[in-house]
Image (cartoon, grey):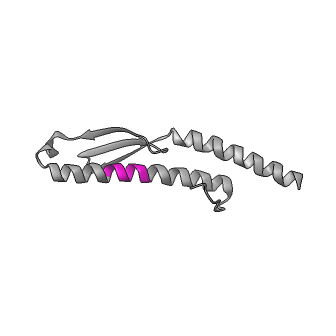
Amino acid sequence: MNELIRQAQMMQKKMLRTQEEIGKKEVEASVGGGMVTVKATCSGEVLSVVIDPAVLEDVEMLQDMVLAAVNEALKKGKDLMQGEMAQITGGMKIPGLF
C-alpha cells in the first residue's frame, strides 16, 4: 500500500512539473491566410497579435479573424497540454486535472 501511495505522489509531482513546463510553451495560430496571427502560451496567456494592415478597412471581418485566431491558439495550447498529460497518466481521466 505504501508503494502505491509513493507512486501516486511521484506521478503527481511529475504532472505538476510537466504542467508548469508545458504552460510556458508557445503556440501560434493564423487565420485569413495569415492576415491575423496570434501567439499564446499553453497556459492561456496571449503573447502577441499581428494584424495585416490590409484588413483594417473591414472592422467586422477583423474582429471575427482576431477572435478566431485567439480561440485557435488557445485550443492548440490546451490540446498540447492534454496530450502531454495523457502521456504521464497513461490516458487515465483524472477528475479536476482538465
Name the one closer to the observer, 96 or 62: 96
> Looking at the image, which residue sits at the far left?
57
Q: Is residue 18 left or right of residue 11?
A: left
Q: In this view, does 72 lie above or below 22?
A: below
- Image coordinates of residue 23 in percent, x first then y, are 52, 42
Write the residue at 66% across / 52% down: 88
Boundaries of the magenta span: 69-75
- Image coordinates of residue 66 in percent, x first then y, are 27, 48
Name the one closer to the observer, 87 or 40: 40
Write the residue at 64% across / 40% down: 17
Q: In which quarter of the image is the C terminus?
A: bottom right
Q: Does the magenta stretch include residue 70?
A: yes
- Image coordinates of residue 9 in percent, x first then y, are 76, 47
Write the residue at 37% across / 53% down: 72
Q: Does any portion of residue 72 appear in the rendered image?
A: yes
> Looking at the image, which residue sits at the far front?
96
Q: Does the magenta stretch include residue 41?
A: no
